[in-house]
């Protein structure tokens, strides 16, 4: 029994240390121009798209920003206060069993748009093992949602952290998931327009048109957690 208690205490200490080490920049990252988009203790720098709610359903615990899917109030996709064009974005995400979410970019915030997906493309966040979307080609974790599938599946199971990265430079993009480049594409050319015409976004005239915009974390009704959200603007 004494050994068991010691093990429990040790695990609690390790968990506490892990939480303490999150959402921070190293001196090297600061020198390279990285900035935190989530400070680990508040939603400063974020707001619900078009301020449709106060965002109270997005909560913080143990250094994680998560959507409380049981909450009736304060729901909605959240977006960065600032807009970005050329950048490297990194973050960690994990989902509950059978959950769905997404990271969207180039989101245009305007009263004429009811949803972030009307303008912003999405890097899919998903439990590939059991969410219905996982059965649909181009709807799996890491995909450029409904447009380009991952070249290789590297997603981890529900409950485990995934490291995602989006690199945007002069309308050329890379998606990385857990250390592997899984999607590459260019926007704002004839090939992009043709791809959109053959997708579910064909009826959305402003989808994928913006060259810069807000970054969004999607409220898809399921519990999803994020941490270590960092961005470095590129020249």
Image (cartoon, rainbow, N blue to C red):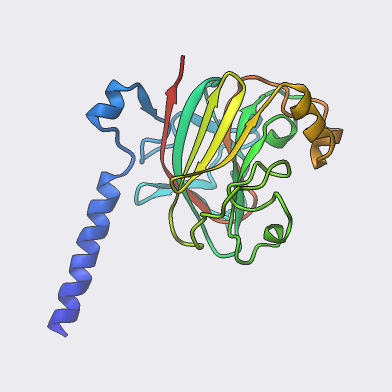
Q: What residue do we see at 66% from left, 47% from top?
A: 149
Determine whether 95 is above or below 175 in the image. below
Vertical arrangement, residue 175 with respect to residue 233, above or below: below
- Farthest-out residue, top: 235
Of residue 88 and residue 222, the one placed in the foreground of this image is 88
Does 39 sit left or right of 57 as displayed?
left
Residue 60, image x, y percentages: 42, 47
Q: Residue at x 72, y 28 (%)?
A: 208
> How many marks are shown on the rendered structure?
0
Q: Is residue 18 visible?
A: yes
Task: Choose between 27 and 172: the one closer to the eye.
Answer: 172
Give the farthest residue toward the bottom: 1
Please indicate whether residue 36 sits to the left or right of residue 223 in the image.
left
Q: Is residue 204 left or right of residue 29?
A: right
* Depth check, front residue: 94 or 197: 197
Residue extending farthest right: 203
Outermost residue on the left side: it is 2
Residue 8 in picture, x, y percent from top left: 22, 72
Residue 76 location (% of width, % of height): 63, 42
Direction from residue 40 to residue 54 in the image, left or right: right
């Amino acid at each position: 029994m004494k050994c068991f208690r010691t093990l429990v205490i040790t695990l609690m200490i390790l968990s506490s240390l892990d939480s303490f080490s999150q959402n921070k920049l190293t001196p090297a990252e600061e020198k390279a121009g990285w900035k935190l988009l989530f400070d680990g203790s508040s939603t400063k720098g974020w707001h619900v798209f078009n301020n449709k709610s106060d965002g109270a359903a997005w909560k913080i615990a143990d250094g994680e920003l998560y959507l409380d899917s049981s909450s009736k109030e304060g729901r909605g996709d959240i977006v960065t206060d600032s807009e970005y064009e050329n950048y490297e974005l990194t973050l960690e995400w994990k989902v509950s069993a059978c959950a769905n979410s997404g990271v969207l970019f180039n989101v245009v915030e305007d009263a004429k748009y009811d949803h972030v997906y009307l303008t912003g493309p999405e890097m899919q966040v998903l439990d590939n093992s059991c969410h219905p979307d996982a059965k649909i080609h181009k709807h799996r974790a890491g995909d450029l949602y409904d447009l380009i599938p991952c070249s290789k599946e590297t997603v981890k199971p529900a409950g485990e952290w995934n490291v995602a990265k989006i690199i945007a430079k002069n309308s050329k993009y890379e998606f990385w998931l857990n250390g592997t480049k899984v999607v590459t594409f260019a926007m704002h050319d004839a090939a992009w327009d043709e791809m959109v015409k053959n997708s579910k976004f064909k009826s959305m005239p402003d989808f994928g048109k913006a060259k810069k915009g807000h970054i969004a974390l999607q409220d898809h009704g399921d519990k999803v957690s994020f941490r270590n959200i960092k961005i470095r603007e590129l020249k």
